[in-house]
Amino acid sequence: MQKHLLLFSLILVFTGCINHNHYQKISYSVDENSISKAQLQHSIQMGLTDINNQFYYVVHKGNQSWHLKDPKLENELLTFSRLDPLGVVHAQYYQRAQKKEFNRIDQRWDAGEEYRQIHLFVDDFTPSEGIHLSSITTFETLTQYQHRRLNVFGRYATTIGGSIVGGVLIGAAVIVAGVSAMIAVVCGCPYIYIGDDFQGNLFSGAINPSLERSDHLLIKSSQDPSVPVIMRIENKKNEHNYTNQLGLVVIDHPFDVSIMTTPSGDIHSISELHKPIEAFSENYNQLDNLITNDEQAYLFDDGVAGDQLNSLNVVFNKPDNTTSGKLVVNVKNSDWYSLVFHEVCGLMGDKFEGWYDKKWEESKSEPTMDMSQQGVYLDVYLMNKGDWVFVDQIKTKGSQASRDILVPLDLTHHDGDRVELMFKSGFKFWDIDYVGMDFSENEPFTVSYIQPISAEDEAGVDYLSSLLSDDDSYMEQTEEGHNVEVIFPLIEQHEGSDQTLILSGKGYYKRLNVYEGKTHYVKLLKLKRTGGISQFSKKKYDEVYEFLYADE
């Protein structure tokens, strides 16, 4: 039974192009023996705030049911704008789940993941006042899983019971590693919006002052040159965000080129992106999907080599007399890595908070573990004269959205007519959608830096001075849901050229996760070995796979 509880805490919402999509209904009584009120509150909040995975909320009172329009949770009160009848397709999914434990998702019905539902059963409530959590007696969810090919990743996770709860992983409070909360979204940090368009996150992975860093986010939304650029910086997670500096980098360039940045923020133009002639994984599986931007990513899941890390190799034809190249990779952190991250933190049990606070006070200290040796960072190597030469590393970018990253290559002393590169990652820590190479020289472009002219939150608090320079003054966002509106002045347009905007920011953030239970010293010592966390990830994944397919 204990093994099953651990594995259920690791089985994730299965998505992607695979053979069969299924869903099932799971029900919990709200009491100390199943799911507590605090755990219920956390699960409801997670279902409301994940931008990629929001749920359809339904309330039941007696024989009546309603859909909650625009639900919001404040403390222990769930409010909504109105009550609507249940959607026809939503009702069909729920009715089928009532009759059968496991169900195939009908592609004729599914236009937007209508099976993703949370049902709240109450004794009584007043619509104008909302729903008090204390009135909820039963918590039900419809959750998706997939069958045949195991291609799993978690949207987010929290251990509160004994099975999956619609994108929320439910495990026992006594599972191995003593995990009491595993929120499988490694990317916290500030969320950046222009209007309702999510642009991405800044300085993901900078989880204490010693990891403070600059980040550079390409603005995807088209801008009206007649109005100022208005951004919303939001703290969407259970954490504290500290933003040191914020500004817009404006690049004017020819219409027939695009602009990208290196991990350190250097700007380059892309004129002609070449596809690789070959791409293969650790086990020499050919990966033609990496040649195009088609959301069919390589997941670094082919097993592990002697150093316990996974690798991906790509090969390009090299033009004659070439002395440089610009490698372009579309990449993000995987959601599986997020789960592993919290599993590892959970091994520290109730000592995690003290350790984290200690590291927080160690200003500008080096990380305690080599991120490259563990496969946390994505390392890039170039084959030259029979040896692999380290080129660069891509630090954590978060799991919410993919980014195009440019890695410059010096090919002055490179031999041969082919350029072969290798990416090294921990097991299922990164997703790479496509890889390309531009051998052209940079086209002429001009760069200007624009500072914000206003930065205020909803209460009128002014943060502008904290964002203008790299100093000891920070914009502090210490409450979940805290928004700051940042306004930039009108940007001058130049006739005959195109324009690209890049948001440049620097900062860090503090996680507020709490873990319980004893510290597993032996397991933690094993993780300090080269590739230890990658090996840990592979072991967890194998346990899930064996559990799912033991009878096949």
Image (tube, rainbow, N blue to C red):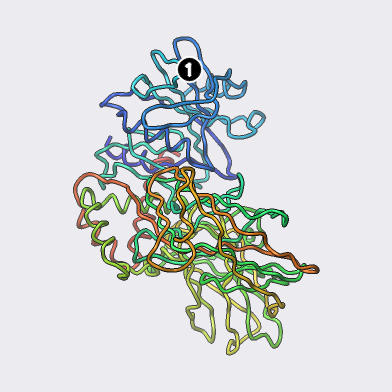
Disc 1 marks which residue? 127
Residue drawn 71% across the image and 86% down it: 320
Q: From this view, report whether residue 109 is shown above or below residue 324.
A: above
Q: Tell me, yes or no, if residue 506 can be seen here.
A: yes
- Amino acid type, residue under disc 1 in the picture: Pro
Is 444 positioned to the left or the right of 183 in the image? Answer: right
Query: x and y percent of residue 164 in the render?
Result: 41, 35
Query: x and y percent of residue 266 in the render?
Result: 57, 74
Residue drawn 58% across the image and 49% down it: 198
The quadrant of the picture occupied by the N terminus is top left
Residue farthest to the bottom, as pictured: 413
Residue farthest to the top, as pictured: 63
Residue farthest to the right, as pictured: 496
Residue drawn 71% across the image and 78% down it: 444
Q: From this view, report whether residue 427 is shown above or below residue 515.
A: below
Residue drawn 60% across the image and 84% down it: 411
Seen from the viewer's position, the closer of residues 540 and 194 is 194
Is 119 positioned to the left or the right of 287 in the image? Answer: left
Seen from the viewer's position, the closer of residues 264 and 72 is 72
Query: x and y percent of residue 412 in the render?
Result: 60, 88
Query: x and y percent of residue 311 in the render?
Result: 48, 66
Q: Residues within 10 Å of mark 1 (few under 14, many from 20)?
A: few
Looking at the image, how many numbered discs can be counted on the residues?
Answer: 1
Callout 1: helix, strand or loop?
loop
Q: From this view, report whether residue 191 is shown above or below residue 273.
A: above
Is 454 positioned to the left or the right of 240 in the image? Answer: right
The quadrant of the picture occupied by the C terminus is top left
Where residue 440 sits, quadrant-wise, is bottom right
Seen from the viewer's position, the closer of residues 273 and 419 is 273
Q: Tell me, yes or no, if residue 330 can be seen here.
A: no
